Image: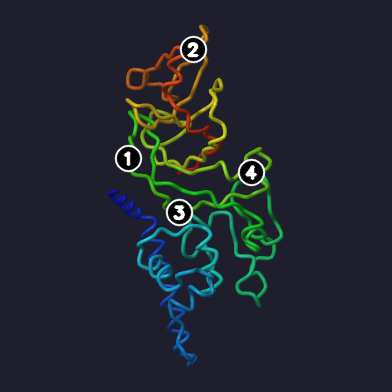
Amino acid sequence: MKKPTRTPLSACQLADAERLRAKYVERVKESRERGDKPTLNQTEVGERCEWKSPQSTVSQYLNGKVALNLEALVKLSVALDFEPADVSPTLAKGITRAVDSPAKPARNAAAANSSPTDTPFPGGADIEPVDEKYAFVPQYSAKAAAGLGHENPHVESVATLAFKREWLRIKGVNPKNLIVIYADGESMWPTIDDHDVLLVDKSRAEPADGQIFVMASADKGVIVKRLVQSPLGGWIIRSDNEDKGEYPDLMLSRSEINEHRIIGRVIWRGGDL
């Protein structure tokens, strides 16, 4: 079986790796100046993060071979003593480390004491303990076309995205049923933009009027569209983009909707403003 090709890191992810590498070099220099024996190294950092392959895992993050995810960012921020936003402003939006190290108090006490439930991402108080406060949803290389469709012949999990467990509970979803993929194209604009992150609930695989779904079909591949029930009982696959010359409605009979396998309902999307 052919091994899937690793998805190249984006410019933003490569910049995260460069900033992380700079923090690591800075901490190694400090360790050397203190006369630590041995000097701080990648293996020690990985062991502090409790990774099974400590040196290899740290090396892949430092050299931009694997994209940082929020769980790794939080662990590395404690191991190397930095604020998450200093390394990855994108991943760290809305979070502040609750502790700088096991023996140090939070730098931002106000942030550490706040944990609003109306936002999906962790706040300061959510960082410790990690697993109890938020769920890590697998983030896949697959794309759902807001356009003509994607075949996605090879799909791999490239990272995880963290969501507050309380936020997920309020939305009535089980983290085990969730995946994160990406939108590609402009057919769902302005609701969903090109490159937006899509949180998909795989347990919601039945058609529902007015809801947005990720679907797969033999001829179109994977698409993200809104389903609208027609007056005759069939379904309309509709793009939110008002340019119907470019993105026309697709009318389906009751039987034809079964030819489009619903992967799940889109319950949240995130992207640039």
Percent of width and height locating residue 184? 37, 37
Cβ atoms under marks 3 and 4 closer than 8 Å:
no
Q: The residue tagged with tag 4: helix, strand or loop?
A: helix
**Amino acid tagged 4:** Leu
Cβ atoms under marks 4 and 1 closer than 8 Å:
no
Nearest the viewer among 43 and 62 is: 43
Q: Which residue is mark 3?
A: 159
On residue 121, the disc is none
Nearest the viewer among 155 and 31 is: 155
| N-term-proximal mark, 4 vs 1 | 1
Q: Which residue is mark 4?
A: 168
Q: Residue at x 37, y 45 (%)?
A: 155
| Residue lying farthest to the top in this orientation | 232
Q: Nearer the viewer, mark 4 or mark 2?
A: 2
Marks 4 and 2, how far apart in space? 32 Å
| N-term-proximal mark, 1 vs 2 | 1
